[in-house]
Image (cartoon, rainbow, N blue to C red):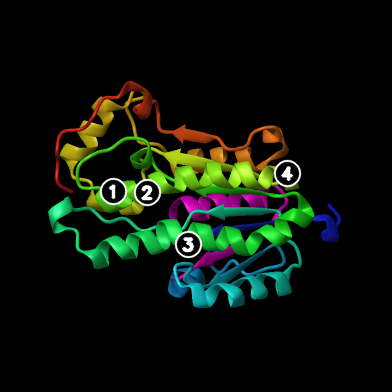
């Protein structure tokens, strides 16, 4: 592919897990990829800076960093075709134990960051008729215990996706959302007890956790030309978990 015709995908929260798997998949399919993460140490460990991939250490929850972030990315490669709003933080606690500080920390990254990054990218996406893929969660589609901040933030991302799609469609910009179910990441395996793992297996029709690449495949599909007439949609990649309506016991992580 001609270097000047390569498309650029920005993936936030790209130092590990779903974000890293997504960045690798886009690069494999011929994209330039800007990997954004606030964890500079993890980005350095990846050793991925090359002609097709470059890491950018920024905190997308900090509005004061976003102008520099987009300026740096555009100076590296002067277009934006895909924005994957993957960066997020988790917080587990009941309503009474969730302080405003904890609530606000979750909202700043999971919701404000999605809104602000999208807002910065829109002028460039108009030029390329690009698209946005937001990452929510199954917790945004169904309520469960201990997720008052996290679940609420992801439900808001789902509604934001629909608002973005309704407003940006006239410019040829598509906006969709992935809602991952339980995924076998290092972080999840570190905090999920055996009881929790078994409870999820029992509640998920496919009887297992998803993998990072399975989520990345859903993201790439929605960003690809194969989804050219799809916008404003929420794709649950969850092994059937949401469709059954079966909840989990009130287990503490």
The answer to whether the residue labelled 2 contacts the one labelled 1, judged by CB atoms less than 8 Å apart, is: yes
The answer to whether the residue labelled 4 contacts the one labelled 3, judged by CB atoms less than 8 Å apart, is: no
- The reply, left or right, for residue 177 in relation to residue 8 is left
Residue at 36% x, 28% y: name it: 242
Q: Label 2: which residue?
A: 185
How many angstroms separate mark 2 from mark 1 (CA)? 6 Å
Please state the horizontal and vertical placement of residue 119, each as a whole percent of the image.
Answer: 60, 61
- The reply, left or right, for residue 216 in relation to residue 52 is left
Please state the horizontal and vertical placement of residue 240, each as a whole percent of the image.
Answer: 39, 25
Q: Label 4: which residue?
A: 170
**In the image, residue 36 lies in the stretch drawn in magenta:** yes
- The reply, left or right, for residue 56 in relation to residue 32 is left
Please state the horizontal and vertical placement of residue 197, each as a whole percent of the image.
Answer: 23, 37
Q: Label 3: which residue?
A: 113
Q: Callout 2: 10 Å neighbours few (<14), some, many (20+)?
A: some
Q: Callout 4: 10 Å neighbours few (<14), some, many (20+)?
A: few
**In the image, residue 37 lies in the stretch drawn in magenta:** yes
| Magenta segment | 15-38
Residue at 25% x, 64% y: name it: 102
How many angstroms separate mark 4 from mark 3 (CA)? 24 Å
Q: Earlier in the sequence, mark 2 or mark 4?
A: 4
Dot 1 falls on a residue whose secondary structure is helix
The numbered disc on residue 189 is: 1
Q: Earlier in the sequence, mark 1 or mark 3?
A: 3
Nearest the viewer among 209 and 56 is: 56
The answer to whether the residue labelled 1 contacts the one labelled 3, judged by CB atoms less than 8 Å apart, is: no
């Amino acid at each position: 592919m001609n270097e000047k015709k390569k498309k650029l995908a920005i993936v936030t929260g790209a130092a590990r897990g779903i974000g890293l798997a997504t960045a690798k998949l886009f690069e494999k399919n011929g994209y330039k990829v800007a990997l954004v993460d606030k964890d500079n140490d993890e980005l350095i460990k990846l050793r991925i800076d090359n002609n097709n991939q470059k890491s950018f250490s920024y905190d997308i929850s900090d509005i004061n960093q976003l102008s520099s972030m987009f300026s740096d990315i555009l100076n590296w490669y002067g277009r934006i075709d895909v924005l994957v709003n993957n960066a997020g933080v988790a917080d587990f606690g009941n309503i009474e134990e969730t302080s405003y500080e904890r609530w606000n920390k979750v909202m700043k990254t999971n919701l404000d960051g999605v809104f602000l990054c999208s807002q910065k990218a829109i002028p460039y996406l108009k030029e390329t008729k690009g698209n946005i893929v937001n990452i929510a969660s199954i917790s945004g589609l169904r309520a469960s215990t201990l997720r008052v901040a996290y679940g609420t933030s992801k439900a808001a991302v789902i509604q934001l996706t629909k608002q973005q799609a309704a407003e940006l469609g006239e410019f040829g910009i598509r906006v969709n959302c992935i809602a991952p179910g339980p995924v076998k990441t290092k972080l999840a395996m570190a905090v999920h007890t055996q009881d929790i793992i078994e409870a999820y297996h029992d509640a998920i029709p496919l009887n297992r956790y998803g993998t990072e690449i399975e989520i990345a495949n859903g993201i790439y599909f929605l960003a690809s030309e194969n989804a050219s007439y799809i916008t404003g949609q929420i794709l649950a990649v969850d092994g059937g978990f949401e469709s059954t309506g079966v909840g989990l016991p009130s287990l503490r992580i």
